[in-house]
Image (cartoon, helix red, strand yellow):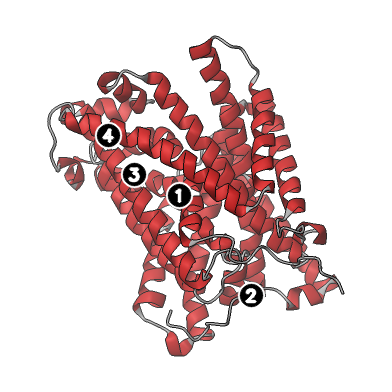
């Protein structure tokens, strides 16, 4: 009798572990460092309001994912969810797009962490090490941690997450303790303080939403979480609320740190956190080290989520079957190896083309646009899923109004990315998304024609826990 494990390790992760992986995937310090200048340029002194509105939108999306996760605990995430909500074609294309979005996280962060580490060593230790050597070294470390299993990834991510949050919260505390530049007030939460009016607030909200991307990764851990139908929703809301509060504090600290009279300076500063660190704390190297720490935790969690998607697609036969296997410890080693080799190669090749930080912007554009499209598709799919498969449990608010409002609000970041069209590599990134989707359509047609058995079996839920389909959503 074949005793080879066929699935991921059930019960390997608690709700806290799933939440940690989601929060680390969001890369709090990295997001604050890179997205604050973009959001502040649009919203100005009303920066924290824009971030708070972004958090509300993400809470709506979290509600959508949680409603799915209560019925379909699976590593397939959007692929499985949308197969049940939009049909097999919609599910496959959702999974196909998710592979592209999560697939870009590794190259994006490997290139960035190699470049930042090289700059840190040169500036503070007078050591010259090529960025690409550091990228390869970090890749090997991440690969090794991932190969130990999801519980070890969660433990490592927790350590680095606590470090990055601790340093930045300490900085916020110093800014608040000194009263900022001109005293503390609620003015930054007034829409009238937006540099570009409501339009500026909307654009600031766009960059705020991009700060949250990654919270949904808890949805890929449904097969490894204990009591997944309960744990995954808890992880989703914990991640959005905890890191959302942190992001809102960061926006408020930035606004009061510059002061109302310094709102224009805040909007124009390409590195406001360097300015604030030097003004209020004077320990510039600590901020740089915190961002590197954040990128490392972000990498661990991003790889964890992407590997589960590759595993799910391989298990169902859309990728080579070998990618859908696990070792004796229920760890998907083949999927880990394939992804790490791809991510490292992409980071190195693209880094030579547009520079390592250019890779961050190029891949980040793909991640942002693709994930927002996936959020919209899931919101639409939830309405159809509950009206179709669970009509007796359909809630007009939970399964109608909330996903509908989420889909409409998420059109804003799509508009912001497309109008006007970006220039250079970031425009190529948008065309790459279109080409990837068209390639997925062609592949889907081939599957329907040549391998109909795969098409028929799409969207299976591989869970070992008792069927709780009748539980309250």
* Residue 28 visible from this viewpoint: no
Would you identify the image quadrant in which residue 395 lies?
bottom left
How far is disc 4 from disc 1 in space, using C-alphas?
A: 19 Å
Give the position of the C terminus as an image quadrant. bottom left
Percent coordinates x, y for residue 299 in the rendering: 57, 41
Contact (Cβ within 8 Å) of mark 2 with mark 4: no
- Asked if the residue at tag 2 contacts the one at tag 3, i.e. Cβ–Cβ closer than 8 Å, the answer is no
Which residue: 71% across, 49% down?
336
Report the Cα–Cα distance between label 2 and label 4. 45 Å
Disc marking residue 23: 1
Location of the N terminus (image quadrant): bottom right
Earlier in the chain: of badge 4 and badge 1, it is 1
Residue 238 visible to the viewer: yes
Q: Residue at x 64, y 38 (%)?
A: 107
* Residue receiving disc 2: 464
Element carrying mark 2: loop
Nearer the observer: mark 3 or 4; the answer is 4
What residue does disc 4 label?
172
Work out whether residue 93 or residue 198 is closer to the camera in this orientation and state it. Answer: 93
Disc 1/disc 3 C-alpha distance (Å): 12 Å
How many residues crowd mark 1 within 10 Å: few (<14), some (14–19), many (20+)? many
232 over 284 or under it: above or below = below
Taking depth in this image into account, of 246 and 56 the one nearest to the observer is 246
Q: Could you tell me residue 226's position as x and y percent?
A: 54, 67
Query: Which callout, 3 or 2, points to the residue nearer the camera?
Result: 2
Q: Is residue 385 above or below residue 320?
A: below
**Looking at the rendered structure, which numbered label has been put on residue 247?**
3
In the displayed structure image, the side of residue 413 where residue 177 appears, left or right:
left
- Horizontally, is 280 left or right of 325 in the view? left
Farthest residue to the bottom: give it. Answer: 392
Distance from label 2 to label 1 (Cα)? 26 Å
């Amino acid at each position: 009798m074949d005793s080879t494990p066929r699935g991921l390790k059930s019960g390997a992760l608690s709700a806290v572990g799933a939440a940690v992986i989601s929060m680390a995937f969001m890369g709090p310090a990295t997001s604050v460092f890179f997205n604050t200048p973009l959001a502040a340029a649009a919203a100005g002194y009303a920066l924290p309001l824009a971030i708070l509105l972004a958090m509300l939108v993400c809470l709506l999306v979290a509600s959508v994912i949680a409603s799915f996760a209560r019925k379909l605990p699976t590593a397939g995430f959007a692929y499985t969810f949308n197969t049940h909500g939009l049909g097999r074609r919609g599910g496959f294309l959702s999974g196909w797009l998710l592979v592209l979005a999560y697939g870009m996280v590794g190259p994006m962060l490997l290139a960035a962490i190699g470049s930042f580490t090289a700059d840190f060593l040169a500036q503070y230790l007078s050591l010259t090490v090529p960025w690409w050597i550091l990228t390869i070294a970090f890749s090997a470390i991440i690969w090794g941690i991932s190969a130990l299993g999801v519980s070890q990834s969660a433990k490592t991510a927790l350590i680095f997450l606590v470090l990055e949050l601790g340093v930045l919260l300490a900085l916020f505390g110093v800014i608040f303790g000194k009263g900022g530049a001109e005293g503390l007030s609620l003015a930054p939460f007034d829409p009238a303080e937006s540099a570009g009016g409501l339009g500026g607030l909307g654009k600031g909200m766009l960059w705020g939403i991009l700060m949250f991307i990654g919270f949904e990764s808890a949805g890929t851990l449904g097969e490894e979480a204990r009591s997944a139908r309960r744990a995954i929703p808890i992880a989703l809301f914990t991640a959005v609320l905890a890191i959302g509060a942190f992001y809102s504090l960061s926006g408020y600290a930035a606004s009061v740190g510059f002061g109302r009279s310094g709102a224009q300076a805040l909007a124009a500063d390409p590195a406001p956190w360097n300015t604030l660190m030097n003004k209020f704390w004077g320990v510039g190297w600590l901020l740089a080290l915190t961002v590197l720490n954040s990128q490392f935790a972000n990498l661990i969690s991003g790889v964890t989520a992407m590997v589960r998607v590759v595993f799910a697609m391989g298990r169902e036969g859309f990728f080579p079957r070998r990618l859908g296997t696990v070792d004796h410890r229920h760890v998907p080693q083949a999927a880990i190896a394939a992804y790490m080799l791809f991510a490292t190669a992409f980071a190195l090749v693209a880094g030579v083309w547009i520079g390592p930080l250019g890779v961050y912007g190029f891949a980040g554009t793909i991640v942002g646009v693709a994930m927002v499209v996936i959020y919209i598709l899931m919101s639409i799919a939830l309405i159809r899923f509950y009206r179709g498969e669970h009509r007796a449990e359909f809630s007009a608010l939970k399964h109608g109004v909330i996903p509908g409002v989420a889909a409409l609000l998420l059109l804003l970041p799509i508009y912001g990315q497309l109008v006007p069209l970006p220039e250079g590599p970031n425009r190529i990134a948008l065309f790459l998304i279109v080409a990837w989707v068209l390639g997925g359509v062609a592949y889907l047609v081939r599957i329907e024609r040549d391998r109909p058995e795969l098409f028929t079996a799409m969207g299976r839920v591989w869970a070992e826990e008792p069927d709780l389909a009748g539980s309250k959503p």
